[in-house]
Image (cartoon, rainbow, N blue to C red):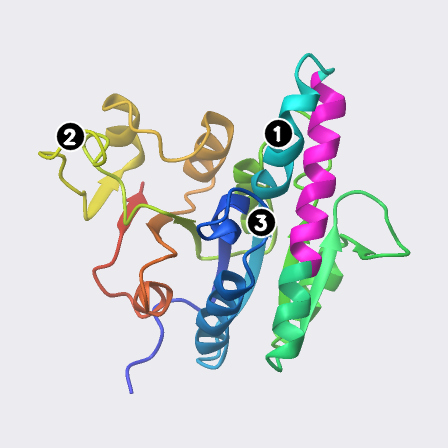
């Protein structure tokens, strides 16, 4: 059997990915399918950490947050990621996978705080670590949290799971002639104005020489193919 291309990875999941076809919230069938994909990768011996967004929950309250102080709204979004992380970890537990949720904001009655040495210990023990509450600071996205945590734990790559199977020359939903890049450099992505991640996250990955792989989480078997180094999605590199 071919060995995985990576030993330690950081998987970035959007909160919207958990919705499935629902308007908001967590679709049980969708989260179970994601856990099955994660389980398959974990069994290969890959050390896996996950950062998850909160858009699927925050979207439901966003109209009421209109005009709200930005910092307050961001803290609400962080709490939404904690809810998603707990749901994901519980689904893993039911599937026989050991996961630990670590939060960037203190909610010790619910989840343990993020402590880097402890996170590294969990990864070395074969546990999946779910990083909740983003960076713990307002004005930073969960993309930035993924770049930050990926750098801190020494991940070899950030896997950005989306609903699109890579980075395209244009929006594939609007332009039928849009083509998918198999690989592209950070500088090329910047010059072509391609939206891979938010600017802060993208700059951090570029500075740390931490490659990004963009792929579709809804495509069956895509996560495993990415881990095995197959031509799946788009690789953004230095």
Looking at this view, name the residue that lies furthest to the top: 67
Q: CA distance from mark 1 to mark 2?
A: 31 Å
Would you say the residues marked 3 and 2 are in contact, meaning their CB atoms lie under 8 Å apart?
A: no
Between 128 and 39, the residue placed more toward the observer is 39
Q: Position of residue 84 (x, y in %)?
A: 65, 52
Q: Is residue 74 left or right of residue 206?
A: right
Q: Earlier in the sequence, mark 1 or mark 2?
A: 1
Tag 2's secondary structure?
loop
Left or right: residue 198 versus residue 106 is: left
The magenta segment? 70-86
- Residue farthest along the left direction in this orientation: 177
Q: Are marks 3 and 1 in contact (CB under 8 Å)?
A: no
Membership of 4 in magenta stretch: no
Q: Give above or below for 74 relative to 238.
A: above
Q: Nearer the viewer, mark 1 or mark 2?
A: 2
- In the rendered view, does 133 fall on the left or right side of 38? right
Residue occupied by mark 3: 52
Label located before the other in sequence (3 or 1): 3
Q: Which residue is mark 2?
A: 175
Please identify the quadrant where the C terminus is shown.
top left
């Amino acid at each position: 059997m071919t060995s995985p291309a990576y030993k330690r990875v950081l998987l970035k999941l959007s909160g919207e990915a958990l919705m499935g076809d629902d308007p908001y919230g967590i679709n049980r069938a969708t989260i179970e399918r994601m856990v099955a994909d994660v389980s398959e990768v974990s069994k290969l011996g890959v050390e896996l950490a996950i950062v998850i967004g909160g858009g699927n929950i925050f979207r439901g309250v966003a109209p009421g947050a209109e005009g709200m102080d930005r910092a307050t709204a961001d803290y609400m979004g962080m709490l939404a990621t904690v809810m998603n992380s707990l749901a994901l970890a519980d689904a893993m537990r039911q599937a026989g996978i050991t996961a630990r949720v670590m939060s960037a904001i203190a909610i010790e009655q619910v989840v343990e705080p993020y402590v880097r040495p402890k996170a590294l210990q969990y990864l070395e023990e074969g546990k999946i670590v779910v990083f909740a509450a983003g960076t713990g600071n307002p004005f930073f996205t969960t993309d930035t949290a993924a770049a930050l945590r990926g750098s801190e734990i020494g991940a070899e790559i950030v896997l950005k799971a989306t609903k699109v199977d890579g980075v395209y020359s244009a929006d594939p939903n609007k332009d039928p002639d849009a083509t998918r890049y198999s690989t592209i450099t950070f500088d090329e992505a910047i010059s072509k104005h391609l939206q891979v991640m938010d600017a802060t996250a993208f700059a951090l990955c570029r500075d740390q020489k931490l490659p990004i792989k963009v792929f579709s989480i809804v495509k069956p078997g895509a996560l495993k193919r990415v881990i095995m180094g197959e031509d799946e999605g788009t690789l953004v590199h230095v």
